[in-house]
Amino acid sequence: MQPDGAQERHFDALKKDAEQRCHGDNPQHGVEARGGASRSEVVISDGEISFPEVSAPDLLLCMTQDSYNRFSSGVKAGGIILSDSTFVTEKPLEGIRCFAYPISNYARNTLGELRAANIVALGILTGLCGFISKEAMLASILSRLPQKLHDLNRQGFEHGYEQGRTMLAGEKSGKSAKEEG
């Protein structure tokens, strides 16, 4: 649920996963990717993937309220929802681990570039979920960008990663994700 070309960069990062996991992706976006709800599915597995579509995701990233409203109810029990609190107001969901951070506000106000929000989100997800190492994700992101954008995106990713680690530590200590953002 990332704006602009973020889905493509996200998939490229996962495809270059230095940890050599198997995965498949099934992007479903069109004009809605320009600000409305879009859906992109990624399957990551240590084994062979026989069906690359997701019926109940383990993880959902919501960058817009429309995405949250449309897709949050499909997350499997015990799954994770990360919402951009700049644009999304969450409702409590039974059995779902919900986290929120003002991703777009940070990108716009601190980094000076709203388009870096997707990289901040990837940092949070990497720190929170551990589905790929920090080094592998950052290397993959930077390999797809011109050199002049490396510092900005490294800063966004690093900040996001630290936020994800803080959210995870807060969850383990009993603090709510809202208290961490």
Image (cartoon, rainbow, N blue to C red):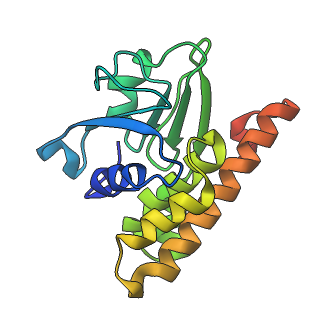
Q: Is residue 46 left or right of residue 167?
A: left
The answer, for residue 40, to whether it is visible in the render is no
Residue at 49% across / 50% down in the picture?
A: 86
Q: Residue at x 57, y 41 (%)?
A: 131
Looking at the image, which residue is at 54% across and 68% down?
Answer: 156
Q: Is residue 141 visible?
A: yes
Q: In this rendering, is residue 159 above or below 14?
A: below
Does residue 46 appear to the left or right of 43 in the view shown? right
Q: Quarter-wise, where is residue 60 in the image?
A: top left
- In-front residue for pair 170/36: 170
User: Where is residue 12 drawn, in percent x and y?
Assistant: 34, 55
Residue reaching furthest to the right: 173
In which quadrant will I find the N terminus? top left
For residue 69, what is the image quadrant? top left
Percent coordinates x, y for residue 50 in the rendering: 30, 20
Residue 10 percent coordinates (x, y): 37, 52
**Residue located at (61% from left, 17% from top):** 78
